[in-house]
Amino acid sequence: MIIRKSTEKDVVTLGAFYDEVVLWLDNHINYPKWMYKEYPSEISARAMTKEGSQYICLNGDKIVGAFVLNIDPQGNYQKGDWQRKLKDGEYMILHALAISPDCQGQGIGSKVVEFCINKAKEDGYKALRVDIVPGNIPAQKLYEKYGFNYVGDYDLDRGYEYIPLFSLFELNWD
C-alpha cells in the first residue's frame, strides 16, 4: 500500500470513494455521522487537495483509504482540556479517516495513524490530535491503541446541531 498526497487528477475518484464509504456507513452504523455528498465528499476532497492536506492510500490503482492531515482544527480546540497546552500550529490534526468497506480489518487504519504520527514528528510538531463523534468506538479503539489520551467531550463551535460535542484525543511527544 502506498500513502501519498492526492492530486487534482485524484479528486473525482476520491469523491466517489468517500461517497461509497458514507453509503456503506448509512447502511450499517454511521459512527462518524458523515453525510452523503456533503462531508466528506468530492467538494471537501477538492478543497483539501488544493490545500495540500488530503491524502490517499492506494493498493495498486485503487483508493482503499483517505484522510486529511493538517493544522486546522476546524473549530475551537482551545476549549479542550489538553494534557499539554500547545498553541495552534504546534500540533497536527487527523481528519476524515476513511477505509474502504472491502478493506476494513486489514490494518489500513493502523498504517494511516503510524504515517500521521511519523509525519507530524518529522515535520517538527509536538503532538497529533484528533476529534471524533462520541460513541465512535472503532475510531476510539484505533487511537487508544497508539497511545492517544482521551481529554473529554467538547462543543467545538462547529455549528453542527446533529453533532453538538466531539471527543478529543491527543498523542504528545518531546
Image (cartoon, helix red, strand yellow):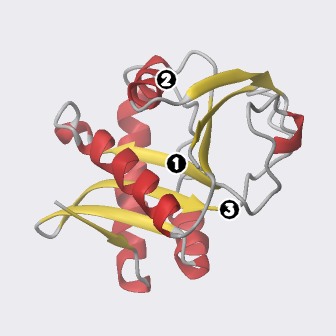
* N-term mark: 1 or 2: 1
Q: Are marks 3 and 2 in contact (CB under 8 Å)?
A: no
Position of residue 154 relative to residue 173, above or below, is above
Q: Position of residue 156 (x, y in %)?
A: 83, 37
In the picture, the disc for residue 17 is none
Measured Cα–Cα span from mark 1 to mark 2: 14 Å
* Neighbours of disc 1 within 10 Å: few (<14), some (14-19), many (20+): many
> 10 Å neighbourhood of mark 3: few (<14), some, or many (≥20)?
some
Local SS, label 2 = helix
**In the rendered image, which residue does mark 2 sit on?**
140
Considering the numbered disc 1 on the image, is that residue within a helix, a strand or a loop?
A: strand
Residue 111, horizontal then vertical, whole percent:
28, 47
Check disc 3 and report its element: helix, strand or loop. Answer: loop
Q: Residue at x 63, y 54 (%)?
A: 126
The image quadrant of residue 84 is: top right
Q: Quadrant of the N terminus?
A: bottom left
Residue 162 shows in the view: yes
User: Gap between marks 3 and 1, in whole Å?
Assistant: 14 Å
Q: Which residue occupies 52% across, 60% down? A: 120
Amino acid type indicated by mark 2? Gln
Mark 3 against mark 1, which lies toward the viewer? 3
Q: Amino acid at mark 1?
A: Ala
Q: Residues within 10 Å of mark 2 (few under 14, many from 20)?
A: many
- Tell me whether the residue at label 1 lies in contact with that at label 2, contact meaning CB atoms closer than 8 angstroms: no
- Residue 79 picture quarter: top right
Read off the residue under disc 3. 71
**Could you tell me residue 97's position as x and y percent?**
45, 46
- Tag 1 residue: 96
Q: Is residue 158 visible?
A: no
